[in-house]
Amino acid sequence: MLWVMLATLPGLAAQTVFFGWGNLINVVWCIALAVGAEAAILKLRQRPLAFYLSDNTAALTGLLLGLALPPFTPWWVSAVSVITAIMMAKQLYGGLGSNPFNPAMVGYALVLVSFPVALTTNWAAPAGLLNGAPGIVETLGIIAAGKQTAIDAYTMATPLDVYKHEIGARVAEEVRQHPSFGEGVAKGWEWVNLGFLAGGLALFYLKIITWHIPVSVLAALAVMSMAFGSNQDLYAPLSLHMLAGATMLGAFFIATDPVSAATSHQGKLVYGAGIGLLLYVIRTWGSYPDAVAFAVLLMNFAVPFIDHYTQPRTYGHRKARRGIVRKNSG
Amino acid sequence: MRKLWDFSGGIHPPQRKSQSNREPIRHAGLPPKLILPLQQHLGSPAETRVAVGDMVLKGDCLAAAIGTMGVPVHAPTSGKIEAMSRQPVPHPSGMVDWCVTLIPDGHDTWCERHPMPDYQHRQRSDVLARIRDAGVVGLGGAGFPTSIKLHPPERDKVETLILNGAECEPYITADDVLMRERAAEVVEGLNIMAWLLGPELCVIAVEDNKPEAIAALRSAAGDTLIEVVTIPTKYPSGGEKQLIQIVTGLEVPHGGIPADIGTMCQNVGTAVAVYRAIYHGEPLISRITSITGNAVAAPGNVEAYLGTPLEYLLAQASLQSDRLDRLILGGPMMGYTLQSALVPVIKTTNCVIAAARGELPEPPPEQPCIRCGACSEACPMELLPQQLFWYAKAEEFEKAEHQNLFDCIECGACSYVCPSSIPLVQYYRFAKGEIRAHNDEQLKSDRARERFEARQARLEREQAEKEARREQRARAAAEAQAKKAEQTDNGGQPLDDRSAKTAAVEAALARKEQKAGKAVSDARKAGGQTGTTHSPGNSGSSRI
């Protein structure tokens, strides 16, 4: 788990460079809360603290939430998210290894639907725009003040959000005039996504994850985008889907959570493809500009089903055994 | 170069073979006593043919084979039978079993031997009988009776005979040194097997980490048709199913045997045992065992008489008790921790590891499974060990079976790579044991139910027959009565006497009928009371 945490560093660094101190502060706050919540519930469940805390999985959940939440998310919204993730989604199901849903995404989805304003208006404007990012003390002040919306001067809608809401009335050229896009695909966001991509490739190189889930997530997203969204004047282009929002964080760090993902290689391909497909569908036709949490959670529901039908062929068997267990007679 | 295939999964644990393969094979000599378990193989235990106090010669049969899967046990040296008793035998649980204790007389006098170097002019069945009588079993690990394996079902034709010299487990070098030093005997043994089976291809497969053995075999095989094949070092390449896949690209079908796809695997040590049985008339009385690990100062391979206590071999290898952490019988992957060093060498003892502290530590405490899938990447049988673990732990055995639990070869590759240090194989053994026990129980209760139902049917049938006979008698009597009455009416015979008799008979019949009816209802009542024991699933056999 330590390696997974380290692999998020390039992405976190890019977030800090382009969007200020918010994510870093969130990460520290969320990790502290996650470890604290884990310790508290382990104590309630009368489990050995040091043994279970040393697996670092609670810290990882905190880290992922810190990376995923908007930089100016009020402290108490993060707290609700983290505590839900650790206590409800993970420990109430029996702790590590027993949770059917990705804990971080349960926490994220809960606050996204409960506090939609806090989760959509608190994205920082990329560095160099407006007044740029506030300093560390100032950022800490905004988060600690606990207001649902941060000062307008520091925030800006995300490129995915802008594109989604403006493409209806304008053509792509006009939409891209919005400052959040910058020179490249999506100012700042492209580097954040490339950072997470680099970290994800490191995980693959270290054999901590296999290629199946990230590749199928990205491939399905790309196929959907090419099939339905080739007209940029109607839909967000492929480049924006790939390099904006939480695409790379989701594909390499969220969807690859082995506990809540499908098991076999083939199952992982199906699972990842489902996430990529849902990601595109919700982003394009749903109400939310980004959809990693919903896509992952929906596919978590499907995992037992996928596992039933993707059991690999065992040595010496002519074909794979699939489907439900047939009871032996007698 | 022969085309080779790969098997999926597999691991590369540290070899640690150079500890024990640097010295030539040493003869362990005669220990003060030999302990010979009656069951050293897969199959039914042998039945003793000697009595306490008997003097026996080297090679004498001490216990004869029972049943088709039986294998005899022979005296490794001449001496006196001191005891027949239950003693600790090599087993993970430290269990005791029946053993013959032999005190060597020091002369090592052979019994009369009957070599069969002209085996090619004999009947195949005679040669197979000789191999069986010599007590030869598979020396690679499982101890399957060799004569049975060499006699596959009629429908199967062995086209590829593979001699297994892979020896893929770390530490073990018994086969390595055997192939280096006795390559000619290996080849002769293979020739005998080939004569028995008539394969089109004979292959000796050796992992590429044994260049000396490969060179020795190549020169021994000379210009014969035997191919010495070098296979890549990867655990568990020496597993029968994996080796067949490497050499032929074929998979042994689920529930089948290698001969079903025209292949057969035999261990190189087994080939030597077959050679000695046929060419020298010698039964299997010794084997080569690696004594290794950091807690012995003089590791190496010894040729030890079967029955030699491991303690004796460890002392010869200068065991340093203060450094010893644990004794492992077999390799570090598939072997187990020994409870006692007093257990003897048996036919399948290929290695004893005296591990020093920190050398092969017990795994750290088990952590939760996070389904990372490292185990399924390592599994050579293409199973999903994480799913098997889940179902075994939850005791959902039906689902575990559906995930092909019984295809697991228990190689331990999954446990080796598990980042949560879960002893996965132990869970699978537990699940297999539970399922087998359940099936046995099921079989027993099915039989009991069948027996009960058969008995019930028989009783009912008897009752019905009785009833029918009685009715027939009653009808006959009534008819006779009617006839007589008619005759009486017609003939004007005296009535009084007759009618009195008829009344008496009728009364008796009525009484009898009443009695029979009562008996039936009594029987029904009794049946109702014991009804619970008749339901299937309960073995009510004692009541029947």
Image (cartoon, rainbow, N blue to C red):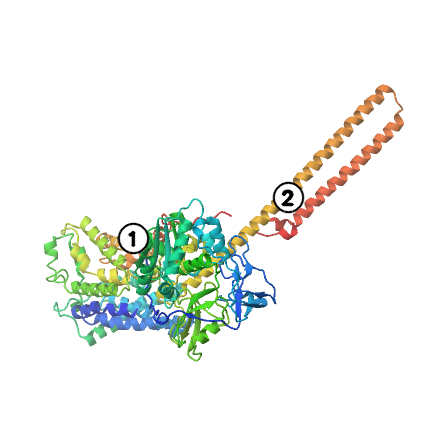
Residue at 88% from the left image edge and 22% from the top image edge: B493
Q: Looking at this rendering, what residue extends furthest in the bottom direction?
A: B322
Residue A166, image x and y in percent?
A: 15, 55
Q: Which mark is residue B456?
A: 2
Which quarter of the picture shows residue B329? bottom left
B263 and A98: which is toward the camera? B263
A108 and B461: which is toward the camera? B461
Chain identity of mark 2? B
* Residue at which label 1 appears: A270
SS for dot 1: helix
SS for dot 2: helix
Number of residue marks: 2
Q: Is residue B485 left or right of residue B69?
A: right
Q: Is residue B445 above or below residue B307?
A: above
**Amino acid at the residue labelled 2:** Gln
Q: Are marks 1 and 2 in contact (CB under 8 Å)?
A: no
Between the residue at mark 1 and the residue at mark 2, the CA separation in whole angstroms equals: 56 Å
**Amino acid at the residue labelled 1:** Val
Mark 1 crowdedness (10 Å alpha carbons): few <14, some 14-19, many ≥20: many
Q: Is residue A34 left or right of residue B479?
A: left
Residue A85, image x and y in percent?
A: 33, 65
